[in-house]
Image (cartoon, helix red, strand yellow):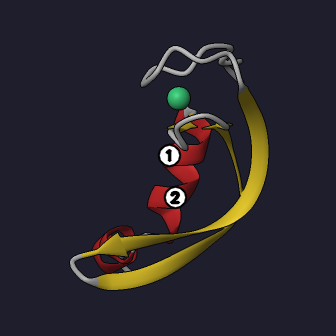
């Protein structure tokens, strides 16, 4: 996993790695993704997702679920 040390939005070094359940929106439909690891800036609130986190979020997305053949 890539370690981010500087916030891409404000340049602050007060960025920490967190693990949370996040709520996302897809075409007005809310869905939750549990235990996502990402970096959060303590100064401006910017969140930075790793490719692994993005893949996990996509796996929970209704868009992804709709495209799956089951
Ligand atoms: Zn920031």
Looking at the picture, does residue 48 appear above or below residue 23?
above
Residue lying at 73% horizontally and 60% vertically, measured from the top left? 20
Q: In the rendering, at what x and y percent does residue 60 appear?
A: 51, 70
Query: Which element carries disc 2, helix, strand or loop?
Result: helix
Q: On residue 57, which mark appears? A: 2
Looking at the picture, does residue 22 appear above or below residue 70?
above
For marks 1 and 2, give the CA distance. 5 Å
- The image quadrant that residue 21 belongs to is bottom right
- The image quadrant that residue 17 belongs to is top right
Residue ranking furthest to the left: 27
Residue ranking furthest to the front: 43
Residue 70 in sight here: no
Residues 33 and 22: in front is: 22
Residues 52 and 9: in front is: 9
- Relative side of 4 to 68, left or right: right
Query: Which element carries disc 1, helix, strand or loop?
Result: helix
Q: In the rendering, at what x and y percent does residue 51 appear?
A: 53, 34
Residue 65 in sight here: yes
Contact, mark 1 vs mark 2 (Cβ under 8 Å): yes
- Relative side of 53 to 63, left or right: right
Looking at the picture, does residue 60 appear above or below residue 6?
below
Work out which quarter of the rendered image holds the N terminus and state it: top right
- Relative side of 22 to 62, left or right: right
To which residue does mark 1 refer? 54
């Amino acid at each position: 996993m890539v370690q981010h040390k500087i916030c891409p939005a404000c340049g602050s070094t007060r960025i920490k790695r967190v693990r949370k359940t996040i709520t996302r929106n897809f075409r007005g439909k809310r869905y939750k993704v549990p235990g996502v690891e990402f970096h959060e800036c303590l100064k401006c609130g910017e969140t930075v997702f790793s490719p692994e986190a993005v893949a996990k979020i996509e796996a929970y997305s209704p868009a992804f679920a709709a495209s799956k053949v089951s």
